[in-house]
Amino acid sequence: MTPDTKDGLHSRCIVALDLPRQESLEIASSLKGIASWVKVGLTLFFLEGPSIVYSLKEMGFKVFADLKLFDIPHQIEGAARSLVTIGVDMFTLYALGGLSMMQAARAGADEASQSRPGQAPKILAVTVLTSMDQEVLQQTGISNGLDDQVKTLASLAVEAGMDGLVSSPLEIRMLRSQVPKDKLIVTPGIRPLGSENNDQSRTATPKTAIDEGADFIVVGRPITAALDPAQAFISLFD
């Protein structure tokens, strides 16, 4: 597979830059013209704040701010406004925060977007973290089975007007049969064949996740820890 794949499968891969600023920017630079999307998570955003978003946007990337917002509705509404202002293209919150919290995010993003035409980001609701399995879920006091919990939170997110969901590869097919077709499904927990699993419990290969119906996949360490991140990215779907 050649690097000329931005309109194909590779345009649906989001590279997770969970490293310090300089390392993240070096990796992003190596991916210019090959990758379309990068992810800024809590580690990088807490270190650098909005400036890292500005830098990545200047390099031509779309930015997925995976900050998993979870707070009272008033705070979430303000956070959503702020994320629109700094120009992110997509961000996350926890569906577990409830209907009012998600609706507040929608309201804040929509309000801020009125003054920034074409800048409205997609809001994604996280269902159950890919690091969690049934045992961990029960430890938190949730008695639902894992699939039932994902379904419940997905329905709530759709009702709240979210643009899509974050879910493990193992729930993609189930969600595709449940939520409207226009809702995005973004899937972390992606591990190419032969890579280490590390801290993810519910994983799949890039091709499997896309075949199951994911709109986007998120890949971090298999790319960012590679000796040649650009080649690792290009080889994802080989």
Image (cartoon, rainbow, N blue to C red):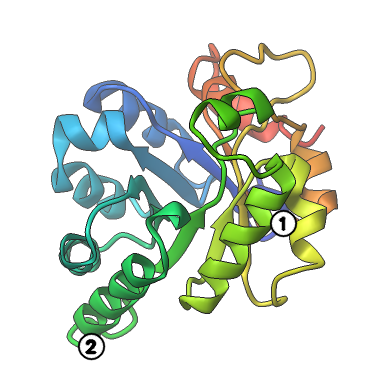
Which callout, 2 or 1, points at the residue further toward the start of the chain?
1
Q: Is residue 81 above or below residue 55?
A: below
Q: Is residue 116 above or below residue 148?
A: below
Spatial separation of the CA atoms under disc 2 and disc 1: 31 Å
Q: Amino acid at mark 2?
A: Gln
> Which quadrant of the figure contains the C terminus?
top right
> Which quadrant of the figure contains the N terminus?
top right
Circle 1 Cα neighbour tier, 10 Å, few/some/many (<14 / 14–19 / ≥20): few
Residue 77, quarter of picture:
bottom left
Q: Tell me what residue is drawn at x 62 percent, y 71 percent.
A: 183
In the picture of the structure, the residue carrying the numbered disc 2 is: 114
Q: Is residue 131 visible?
A: no
Viewer-proximal residue among 31 and 180: 180
**Left or right: where does residue 132 sit relative to residue 40?**
right
In the picture of the structure, the residue carrying the numbered disc 1 is: 8
Viewer-proximal residue among 154 and 227: 154
Residue 199: x percent and y percent?
56, 17
Q: Tell me what residue is drawn at x 71 percent, y 32 percent.
A: 236
Q: Amino acid at mark 1?
A: Gly
Residue 73: x percent and y percent?
24, 66
